[in-house]
Image (cartoon, rainbow, N blue to C red):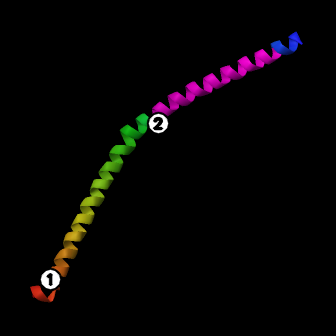
Amino acid sequence: MNDFNRKVEEASSRLNQSIAEATARLEKETAELITHLNDQVVPKVREHSTKALRTAAEKMKQLADYVEKHTPAHK
C-alpha cells in the first residue's frame, strides 16, 4: 500500500506541475493578447469607426439637401 501511495503522490505532483505550467503559459499569452488588442486592434477599430461616422454624416447631409430641394415648400 505504501508503494501505491507514493505512486499516487508522484502522479499528483506531476499533474500539479503540469497545471501550474499551463496556467503560467495561459496568463502570459492572455497578457500578450490584451496588449496586442490594445495596441493594434482598438486603434484601427476607432479609426474605421470614425471614418464610417463621417461617411454616414456626409450621406445624411446629401439626403437632407435632396429632400429640401425636392420639397414643394422650398421650390
Task: Indicate the amino acid at tag 1.
Answer: Lys
Residue 49 placement (x, y as % from top left): 31, 54
The quadrant in which the C terminus is found is: bottom left
> Which residue is drawn at the image coordinates 27% and 54% (left, top)?
50
- Dot 2 corresponds to which residue? 33
Which label number is shown at residue 69?
Answer: 1
57 w.r.t. 14: above or below: below
Magenta extent: 7-32
Query: What residue occupies the far top of the structure in this picture?
Result: 2
Question: Residue 72 is drawn in which quadrant?
Answer: bottom left
Tell me if residue 24 is in the magenta stretch.
Answer: yes
Query: What residue occupies the far front of the structure in this picture?
Result: 1
Left or right: where 46 falls relative to 6: left
Q: Magenta residues: mostly which secondary structure?
A: helix
Residue 61 placement (x, y as % from top left): 19, 70
39 w.r.t. 71: above or below: above
Task: Indicate the amino acid at tag 2.
Answer: Leu
> Which residue is drawn at the image coordinates 72% and 17% (left, top)?
13
> Which residue is drawn at the image coordinates 62% and 22% (left, top)?
20
The residue tagged with tag 2: helix, strand or loop? helix
User: Pointer 1 and pointer 2: residues touching (CB < 8 Å)?
Assistant: no
The residue tagged with tag 1: helix, strand or loop? helix
Tell me if residue 36 is in the magenta stretch.
Answer: no
Question: Residue 39 is drawn in which quadrant?
Answer: top left
The mark that comes first in sequence, 1 or 2, is 2
Question: Residue 73 is drawn in which quadrant?
Answer: bottom left
